[in-house]
Amino acid sequence: MDERDLLNTPLMRHFVSHYANPAGPDLLARTEPFFAWQDARRHAGLWPYSRSLEAAPDAECGVRSELGELRVGDNFASQDYLSLSTHPAVVEAAHRGIRDHGLHSAGSAMLGGNTAPGLRLEAALAEALAMPHVALFPTGWAAGFGAITALVRPGDHVVMDALSHACLQSGADAATRNVVRHRHLSAEAVAESLAAIRARDSANGILVVTEGLFSMDSDTPRIDALQALCGEFGATLLVDVAHDFGALGPGGTGSIGVQRMLGKVDLVIGAFSKTFASNGGFLATRSPAVRQFVRVLAGPHIFSNALSPVQACVVREALGVVRSTEGEALRQKVRGNAVALREGFAARGIGCLGDPSPVVPVPVGDAAVARLAAKRVFERGVFVNLVEYPAVPVRGSRFRMQVMAGHAPEQVRRAAVIVADAIDEAREVVASGRRRARVPARYASPVGAD
Ligand SMILES: Cc1ncc(COP(=O)(O)O)c(C=O)c1O
């Protein structure tokens, strides 16, 4: 196959968004155009999603594509930042949890699904975050969506960073039509929105939503400035610490700890799935009233089975490691790997986005280049996630690489070379294809519009 022949086809030019709103009366039949496009990408090796791991998410592992193709190689696609999912003490805690509590919570948290390990985990999180009241959720997504939809009513307002995670965006949209999305990381834009809302509405609440570490860009807002603005305008701040809690900051306290805001943020939500070796999420608050209100009014808390006791045991053990000197050493390893990976790309003229963290976003830009590069990277045994529109801007395709404590320096060096080589080669294929077709680059680049 001459890859250049694909350049001007839907395989390269279309995004999921082209197929996301099909028309027609048959809800099932109208999924077919999407499937045809996706399947063509899959068979051309250009659908780098929905792969499966053959074993634990280790730094080196076996990965199978949806077509069943198996590669063994270096894993920069898993979210296990401190490599705790295979830590002996954490694994042992899972075995003990199964032995003592069985496998399943067997009920929603409202209806018998709370467990002794879950209560102990709530207390441990409360201490770690200096927020005395914690509610658990079955996933991080459920914590974000559930907390926002429980607290925000249709007359209220949400002011959120435009790049907030889907669970926060969906929660805001489900709760109210009064959602303002502001320029990424801009405290000035937040101040303007809060002033404008308060000038016309002093009767309703305002929730300001941000993240401790944005996972597509590896950057962080001024949490202290946002909390001060909320105080000034009678608003409430919610910070989602899914990616930074455990993996960054003193004692693993994340960006909130780095900014000396521990115990001072109105609402903290998070996920266990990046650092704590389990599914699950939480809301932490200083108010017992808020905790009880959210537990009873958040749909995912009462209408979904609770975190299992095994998960609670795993997360509590992982939290113990996170807060120990061993945890500090693991964070140093992650940071060293992140810096080394970024340096590897810098040496090839590629400036990774944001600041050093377990997330290393490698900008590519053009979706056609990114898809061809992703194919090469997989074939050469490096596993990375390709992020495309609409998760990032149309011309903002990137690889999101995630480093773990368990990566060896040699793996990191090798991965930077393999990914950079793949991007260079893919750029050459695309440039050559466009020269051949004599299409000016500004028209040939994939867009979300055709
Ligand atoms: C900021 C943020 N919040 C929430 C979630 C959802 O967490 P989970 O995958 O544990 O449901 C994620 C990631 O998936 C995230 O990045």
Image (tube, rainbow, N blue to C red):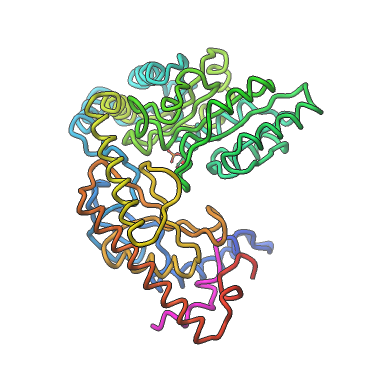
Residue at position x 33%, y 31% in the image: 311
Q: Is residue 141 visible?
A: yes
Position of residue 310 relative to residue 380, above or below, is above
Residue 244: image quadrant is top left
Q: Is residue 111 visible?
A: no
- Residue 90 in the figure: left or right of residue 384: left
Q: In the picture, which quadrant includes the C terminus?
A: bottom right
Position of residue 125 relative to residue 189, above or below, is above
The x and y percentages for residue 313 are 29, 26
The x and y percentages for residue 125 are 39, 21
Residue 88 among magenta residues: no
Residue 178: image quadrant is top right
Residue 105: image quadrant is top left
Q: In the picture, which quadrant includes the N terminus?
A: bottom left
Report the front residue among 210 and 67: 210
- Residues rendered magenta in the picture: 1-16
